[in-house]
Image (tube, helix red, strand yellow):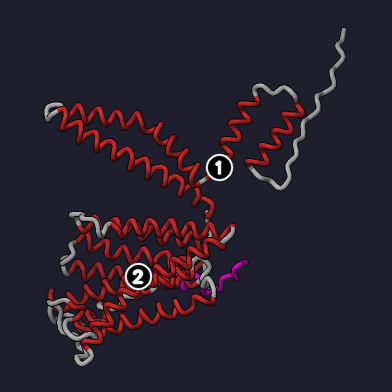
Amino acid sequence: MREPSRPSTAPRRGWTVLALALASAALGVLFGALNHFEPAGSSAFWFNLVIPLAFAVPGAVLVGYRPTNPIGWLLATMGLAGGLSEFLAEYGRYAIRTSPGSVPGGVLALWLSSFVWFPAIGLVPLLFLVVPDGRLPSPRWRPVAWVAVADMVVATLAVAFAAGPIGGEPSAPPNPVGIGLAGQVLELVGPVSFFLAPLLAVVALVGLALRFRRARATERQQLKWFAYGAFLLLVGLAALFVPIRSEATAKAILAVGVGCFTAAVAVAVLRYGLYEIDVIINRTLVYGLLTAALGLGYASAVLVGGQLAGQQRSNLVVAAATLAVAALFQPARRRIQQVVDRRFNRRKYDAARTVEAFSARLRDEVDLDALSNELLGVVDQTMQPTTASLWLRPAPPARPRGR
């Protein structure tokens, strides 16, 4: 189904979203520099601003080019919420700690920053539900969407009106609108709402898997792009739970994962280069497995060989392991490529085997009719066309020889 043409105001909306995202990032940089990039540090601070932009920029593009698709608005809202929260937090720190009384509204800014970021997480289940065409898989999924919206609202209210320090930080000022009488209820509702968000995301992924089973042609390729981006996002999120010494390194890996995810979503919605995803997935599997295999082999050879050879000959062991890995690179890549094609791209693997077998028989075949029939059979097995025919140009008549 062809989408309706975009209205004349659609590009302007995309530019507006992009301008708001860049303005939030610029103001966050300004007040972050005034706060001397504390407490996160300069490197981690930059990635805290890059991650919201990774949502907002593709969202602005989709808002401009696919204004009727809500996916662009979801990405833009998630990015703007994250960027605005970072700016308000830096503004509040500057107004209360760095330079008290120099600018107004410090407590209000900290209060807003404590809950305005939640749409960046609460909208994830809705994003999973409406990918790639902006509609739910079926009307039966409407309760899941409404529960996701209600959970986001409840979690926001629980944080906004919780008694005690703003955001639960001991050094923060007390919440000016905290409700003391309902403190126990809010303390119970808040964690439940935060736990329910990832659970709803898992339920939405189940709906996405069911949609993939029913998808055909273009929609299947769109979902492949989304699944590939989600895989890279999970790799980026895993960096937060791996014991990495530098917080900036973990934030950098997360920023790359988020950027790849939102870019993949934009490609899926815009339908640009959809059929390249099969090649990308194939190369990712091949070189990922190759890197893991050669890396483990190199590390094992260096550790075991270094222990057996002793400290004096450890350099020779490292050099030998390096040469062995270099020599095994191409054979291992070909072998892993065959395994991946046989397991994940069976049609290509069978076609290659059929062509190889035909090439071997071609050397011994002398009957032109049998060769023509066999060639048509190979084309039908490998390319699977609707119809196939073979035309052979007749031999030119022999010229009479002159005297």
Disc 2 secondary structure class: helix
Q: Is residue 34 left or right of residue 286?
A: left
Q: Give the Cα separation between the discs numbered 2 and 1.
A: 38 Å
Per the image, the residue denoted by label 1 is 348
Hey, which quadrant is residue 107 in on the image? bottom left
- Please provide the residue range marked out in magenta: 1-21
Q: Where in the figure is residue 118, as x and y percent of width and height? A: 32, 75
- Find residue 357 and report its horizontal and vertical position in percent: 60, 30
> Which amino acid is tagged 2?
Pro
Residue 67 visible in the picture: no
Tell me the kind of residue under disc 1.
Answer: Lys
Position of residue 305 measured from the top left corner of the image (x, y, whole percent): 20, 31
Residue 129: give x, y in percent of width and height. 46, 70
Give the camera-side residue of 225 and 371.
Answer: 371
Identify whether 296 is placed above or below 271: above
Quadrant of the frame with the C terminus:
top right
Which mark identifies residue 215? none
